[in-house]
Amino acid sequence: MHPAFSVIFFTVASGAGFGLFSLLFMADMFKLGGGFSQGQLVAGGLIAMGLVVFGLLASTFHLANPKNAWRAFSRFRTSWLSREGVFAVVFMPLALIYLASIMFDAPLWLRGTFGFLTAVLAWITVFSTGMIYACLKTIRQWNTPLVPANYLALGYASGSLLLLLGAVVAGLDTTPFIAMSALIISIAAVLKAIYYFWIRSPGLTPTINTATGLTRAKVKLLDTGHTHGTFLTQEFGFRIARQQAGLFKVIVFVVGFALPGLMLVWVFNQQGGQAAAIIAVVAGLAGAAVERWLFFAEARHVVNLYHGAQRC
Amino acid sequence: MRLGLVIDLDVCVGCHACAIACKEWNASGTIGPLSDYQPYGAEPSGVWFNRIRHFEMDVYPNNKTVNFPMSCMHCEDADCVTVCPTGASYKRPEDGIVLIDQDKCMGCNYCSWACPYGARELDRSSGTMKKCTLCVDRIYDQELPVEERQPACVLTCPAHARMFGDFDDPDSAVSRTVRERSGYPLMPELNYNPTNQYLPSRRMPVIPVDAKPKGGLKASIKQFANKLVRR
């Protein structure tokens, strides 16, 4: 699959934004590290919402006909893309009510209820983003429950690193934030490893024999019927070399998981402070972006069976 | 009504006439003109609804070329309709034709990801997705004579490899042919239930091909005379 940079930016930014918002709610409810001040909570919430909005806007850049983009909310009943759009939009006013309830000293039950609803909605939205890809039967590397799981894990990992940076800047006790981040990053790393393990062997997939119905003998493509590229070859023909994919996977684990992990240790030992927290955030987001690029690059759509592949 | 095509792989010669006819008809069809990119340039490409791919089955000396025309299968459980966020992609309940509403499509490509057969293509000039319409503007056109109310590709095929009809009618030509010749859909394991069916090769006796006649001049003359008599 051709990796579209606008979609990569969208999913990484919105995942981090939703993750940050949910974890901010947790930090608020449990007064983690001593508790952020009202202003800090609202600032953090607005930053999270800003990331989400930036992500959503970025996603419209991959549309060929954006004037109809408003119609994308209309098929909530059947399309995960529609559902994701609706949930993301419903999230906004609820998040603003939660932030307002913090700002204007609303009673705890109100603040807690709206915060909880918003956190749940954030979770559901990131899940829907993952399901956009996971519901497709045509791409076996995506058609697994590990995909929405990974979207959630990586979004929350990035969000937890952003929250840690906020805690360092606010001068709070960073221990609970470090613990939360370490846990989420470890889970994300393990889930990612399981995913790469899972997709390495084909399993039960369509082959050129089932794609053509010529099942009694070996079949190979003689000619695609076009001398130069088509929409299909441009969109689905992207192929990544095995070694290149291996290198990128190493980058994902080193930059995306190990480096932030090291930075967490430094912050814990008071060696790094703000600089370490910033490096952790940048590394986490960069690792997530490479992971998302690889997610697209490693995907082989079954239409490749009609363009020379033997199995997908 | 469940309208669709039957394509006879035994007869298709791979001439691409159906692809050209489709392209010509859709120069002004319901879905608008199909773009050409660099038609006279270095890398000509474009939007085509019907594409013929060529496969080789088995290995020499038992190999065989199979020509595979493919267009939209108008699937019963079309995921391209399910995943479309704007509702541009829809399946008509009266005849099962899957169409794209050009006024709603936002060109997100999501439907093309869902289609296993590569039926949908993005037209860069309109920014929308386009695909085979089963010539919905021909088959219901009262201005055309009855025998011409068929898809352009079906009418054009010089080898009569394409048929059009109603699969819900068990006595229609398409239903009968699929039954008699064991027609099959492509990639059935994905459960899209494509309407278009393909007819496999008929069982033909192997024609013996002797590279060199055995036995010298007298034997080869005798063989030649025998062949003449047989003909």
Image (cartoon, rainbow, N blue to C red):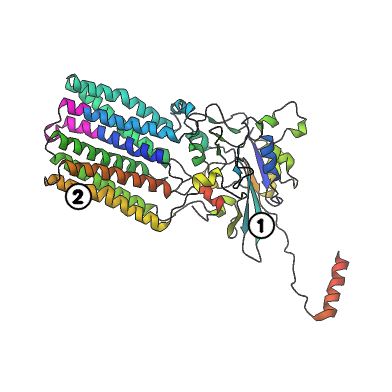
* Amino acid found under the numbered disc labelled 1: Thr
Reply above or below: B122 against B214: above
The quadrant the C terminus of chain B occupies is bottom right
Q: Nearer the viewer, residue A146 or B205?
A: A146
Tell me the residue at 74%/41% (across/down). Answer: B156
- For the residues tagged 2 and 1, is the chain the same? no
Residue B4: x and y in percent read: 64, 38
* Magenta-span inclusion, residue A34: yes
Residue under numbered circle 2: A262
* Amino acid found under the numbered disc labelled 2: Leu
What label does residue A58 carry, if any? none
In the picture, residue B74 is in which quadrant?
top right
Q: Mark 2 lies on which chain?
A: A
Query: Magenta segment, principal secondary structure?
Result: helix
Residue A237: x and y in percent read: 50, 49
Q: Is mark 1 on a helix, strand or loop?
A: strand
Residue under numbered circle 1: B65
Does residue A137 appear left or right of residue B148 in this picture?
Answer: left
Most distant residue in the front direction: B41
Any part of residue B176 in sight: no
Q: What element carries label 2?
A: helix
* Magenta-span inclusion, residue A140: no
Q: Which of B57 and B38 is in front in this view?
A: B38
- Give the distance between the C-alpha atoms of the residues marked 2 and 1, in whole angstroms: 59 Å
- Kindly check if marks 2 and 1 are in contact, taking CB atoms under 8 A apart as contact: no
Q: What stretch is highlighted in magenta?
A: A22-42
Q: Mark 1 lies on which chain?
A: B
